[in-house]
Image (tube, rainbow, N blue to C red):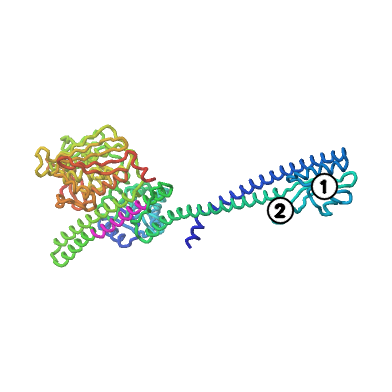
Amino acid sequence: MRVLVVEDDGKAAGYLANALRESGHNAELASDGPTGYELARAGDYDVLIVDRMLPGRDGLSLIDGLRQEGVRTPVLILSALGGVDDRVKGLRAGGDDYLAKPYAFSELLARVEALARRSAPEKAETKYVVGDLVLDRLSHQVTRAGEPISLQPREYRLLEYLIMNVGQVVTRTMLLEHVWDYHFDPQTNVIDVHISRLRAKIDKNFDRPLLHTVRGAGYMVRDGSD
Amino acid sequence: MGLIRLLRTTAFRAFFFYFALFAIAAAIAVAYIYWKTNVLLAAQLENSIQAETQSLDEQYRAGGIEQLVRTVGERSETPGNSLYLLTDAGGRRLAGTLKAVSTELWNSEGRVAFVYRRPAANGSEDRLAYALVFRLQDGSRLIVGRDIEDRREFGRVARSAFLWTLGGMALIGLLGGLLIGRSFLRRIESITLTSQQIMAGDLSRRIPLTAAGDEFDRLAASLNGMLQRITELVDSFKEVSDNIAHDLKTPLTRLRNRIETALREAGGEYAYREALQATIEEADEIIRTFDALLSIARLEAGTASNARNEFDLNVVVGGVCDLYEPVAEERGITLACQTASPTVIRGERQLIAQAVANLVDNAIKYGGDANGAEPSAKGNISVRIAMNGETAQIIVADRGPGIPPADRERAFKRFVRLEASRSLPGSGLGLSLAAAVARLHGGHIDLLDNAPGVKAVLTLRRDGGNHLLTR
């Protein structure tokens, strides 16, 4: 995956690029708005990571410019401004996701990978299969080894989001945002409890667990043992 | 110095302007009356002299000079303010009240004004007269006139009366202007003084109000309101920076100590990993606290955002219940959420959801374990919505140990964690944040006694309290 990081803080950008490379991605750097714009326009990237406050050209204006040029590369906005309205502004300018600084790298990586996947030209699945778990998006039926599993609507959506990102880490914040549409910190480990409930329903009576906890990052649905 | 300032007040300038305007108007009125009166009196004088001259001429025509001498002589006995002089062609006086006239006058003909002497208390006096000089057929002269010194006197009196009045008016006006100007100046001075004291750094100063309830008091009240709001904002920012300084330095120190300890003890890779993991968790906690503090500060500044929408409160409350229900169940608490008929309100959905979430979170954390309460009542949390005209209320009630009345106010303070909760995780900012959200929506939070337990009532204005922003 090719990632362009547009960030003016050299230290932060270097750290980010190194961490991305260690995760097996190809990261390039641009340290100001105009350079970032030119690179993003010319290069073939899977995801752009754009800081909101950049020298030369503001991050939001950069994204807006790219979108007007028809560049559809998914963008993750990084910003020190973490208010609800800052997020709304960022997404309105054409950003696909928004992450407030300071962030955990695992959070950023999970989001970047989710963005890259979203842009992959892949027809909308109507049926997801992970091992012997089947989720039918038309009938909202979930079965494991042929046995139907009864899920609450919220549990269904939780599983659906995890399965759509199969093999990828999904963070607690991403679940909170996509399944509940909440953009705040719920203080208690509410997501963990939801996950353990879901796990009890889909994994409890089976040898091979499908819903895994990724320490320090989040959760992942994947076929195979740890 | 003070007088100069007084003379430069608006009130004083207004007085001068009105005084000038009034003086001009008065002068025009008096001048018009004076002129009109003069014209009228002159016409009257003219007529009476004409008439008398006419009748004397008839006497002359009927009885010759002898009869005229007789008539003039008779009339001169009781002259009033009439003046007569009859002379022959040579200028010799035949009859009349006047002893003699100047040759110039004698030689003239027709209307003439002149000064004559008249005996008075102290010798004699000069008086103004108006007369008609008439030549008879035999060359003798008849002068019929009237003493008009009184009229001149009237003019003089009118003029001086006018000037005196104007002077009096100016004096009264000046005094009035000074008095009003001084009272205006005093009011303005008190505002100026207060604002200077505030500029000098004493933000607690307020403009004193008088009992008058006039426009100055309204202005002062409005300015005081503004000052109050500014003070609140400054205090809020000051409090936030104080809190950041104090409450973030503590965990930062802890963080630093942990790293130092790990380095000193040289416990091998596993110990290092453990220490680093703990460090990250500590850092995350600091970030969360920092975010919460910033959110509260932005909410309280009222500058948070304009992302207000209309939405059904039931959906938000239902969502929060859905989010927390498993956590509650895990702790043996029943979270009972009553949703009602659609309750559409205007506001920031995310913030309101966060406020409700914080209240539910608190109820689960602190209200779930009812030490000494009825076992049957243990861990029942109810969440419901109540509509109340202009406001909507979200009521989160638990059956926990409750909060003593003395501690309820304190519970809203940032970082305050009541005794019972010290051992539980949490930043101590949840209720402060919820209260800030409520205020942003024109509402408030009340902590009531649920006997036993706490009943937290989040009141929001259904219109989102937008009027507060444009206030």
Q: Nearer the viewer, residue A138 or A173?
A: A173
Q: In this image, A72 relative to A112: left or right?
A: right
Tell me the chain of label 1: B
Q: Quadrant of residue B262?
A: bottom left
Residue B81 placement (x, y as % from top left): 73, 46
Residue B120 is labelled as: 2
Whether B430 is among the magenta residues is no
Same chain check for tags 2 and 1: yes
Residue B240 placement (x, y as % from top left): 28, 56
What is the residue that sits farthest to the right in this orientation?
Answer: B138
Mark 1 belongs to which amino acid? Ala
Look at the image and give the residue range highlighted in magenta: B226-246
Magenta segment main secondary structure = helix
Residue B54 is labelled as: none
Rendered position, A206 above or below A214: above
Q: In this image, B14 relative to A12: left or right?
A: right
What is the residue that sits farthest to the bottom in this orientation?
Answer: B264
Residue B95 is labelled as: 1
Whether B227 is among the magenta residues is yes
